[in-house]
Image (cartoon, rainbow, N blue to C red):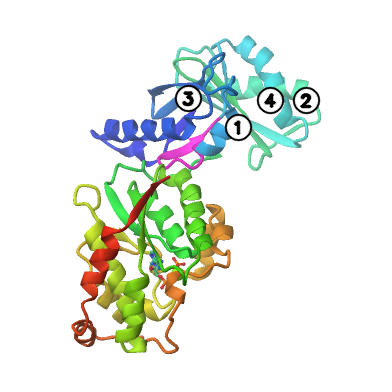
Amino acid sequence: MAKYGEIALKGLNKRTFEEILVKNIRRSLSDLGSFEYSRAQSTLYITPQDNTSVGANCVRPQLDEAVTRLTKVFGLGAIQKCMVLPKDFDIIVKQGIPYLETSLKHAKSFKVEAKRADKTFPLNTPAIQQELGGAILSAYPHLQVNVHNPEVTVILEIRDKGAYLNPKRITGAGGIPVGSSGGAMLMLSGGIDSPVAAYMIAKRGVKIDAVHFQSPPYTSERALMKVHSLCEKLTKYLVEIRLNCINFTEVQEAIRNNCPEDYSTVILRRMMIKAANILYDNKRHGALITGESLGQVASQTLQAIACTDNAAELPVLRPLIGMDKIEIIDIARKIETFDISTLPYEDCCTIFTPKHPKTKPKLHEIEAIEAKFDYDELVKIACNQSTVKFF
Ligand code: ATP
Ligand code: MG
């Protein structure tokens, strides 16, 4: 049982959200076997189909992996891996109690939480809790009931189609389904911040394409592989990613050769934005996303951000703007991008880094510097030669 998060509160357009959610889930579970999907009462029932096979080796659906993947699908509030039983209390006790053994045998305390959506079921909620609790105590006498802080909460939901028994409610990823809020273009470096920015905006339903700038031979093939690994990790949340790769070597060399060194960082950032302006597609993208956080480095002061924004044709979303590095790292660890991001390969931003980057750049000064060389032409050529990879 996969229970909706915020979608449950949607009004007339709930159906649209549900359809996108189901599509995303189908995609996420597609290689784990065959599942049947049905919806009712703000819950999606995902039923493994026995005796079917997908691919040569997959005979039974892989349930635990499916549950793990579901915890990363935006739009779900909770996931419960249930035994489905007939709505007959004696059968529930007889078949259900052995099913709970692995969860209860080493636990010290438990409680039963019953929900009776089907009001025709003969026992009411307190009676179900009492009777089932009693039956569990007789089967596992070492247990104690603890209603306030139990180690295991046995959940029994009497719903239209059956009785759903499970010993755990797993928290879902929350948010709304990817694709329900349109799309955006992420500026994806190999660092810690931009993957976290992607996660946060995808959580609000945005489908994300990415652009990565590399500068070979200053940046290595391994730096690019790192970005590919980040995309692979991120697809668990982002569903799929179209990654554009742009060779920015000539642009960076032109900046190094023609700009005052202290302005090079912010000018490079503006050129990246200008490349994104060329790459984005009106139909797919309504914003750009970066991993900038206020004051983190010289290119992330209010003045530098104003100069960067001035180059952008789309709104720039910066979900990390008010976050500390520690908070960002916590999320990076949770979404498992941290260990990849901290691999020691050079990013194009760290080459030619000025010793004293300007922290309060002024737009008119930047425009005067940029007017002395045709950077736009180099950016255009770089974009024309960009490559695309799908994850
Ligand atoms: P990150 O950890 O995301 O690399 P950072 O703290 O290193 O961020 P900067 O290097 O100043 O900060 O980059 C700020 C933002 O600019 C990044 O979060 C990312 O969105 C974008 N960016 C930087 N380098 C690249 C790159 N090589 N390709 C694409 N986007 C980039
Ligand atoms: Mg960086």
Q: Which residue is mark 4?
A: 100
Mark 2 against mark 1, which lies toward the viewer? 1
Which structural element holds mark 4? loop
| Residue 11 forms part of the magenta stretch | no
Q: Who comes first in sequence, dot 2 or dot 3? A: 3
Relative image position of residue 121 (x, y in whole percent) = 50, 13
Residue at (29, 60) in percent of width and height = 288
Which structural element holds mark 1? helix
The amino acid marked with disc number 1 is Asp
Which residues are the magenta region?
70-80
Q: Residues within 10 Å of mark 1 (few under 14, many from 20)?
A: few
Which structural element holds mark 2? loop
Q: Which residue is mark 3?
A: 46
Q: Who comes first in sequence, dot 3 or dot 1? A: 3
Q: Residues within 10 Å of mark 4 (few under 14, many from 20)?
A: some
Q: Who comes first in sequence, dot 2 or dot 4? A: 4
Mark number, residue 64: 1
Q: Which residue is mark 2?
A: 140
Q: Quadrant of residue 380?
A: bottom left
Q: Residues within 10 Å of mark 3 (few under 14, many from 20)?
A: some
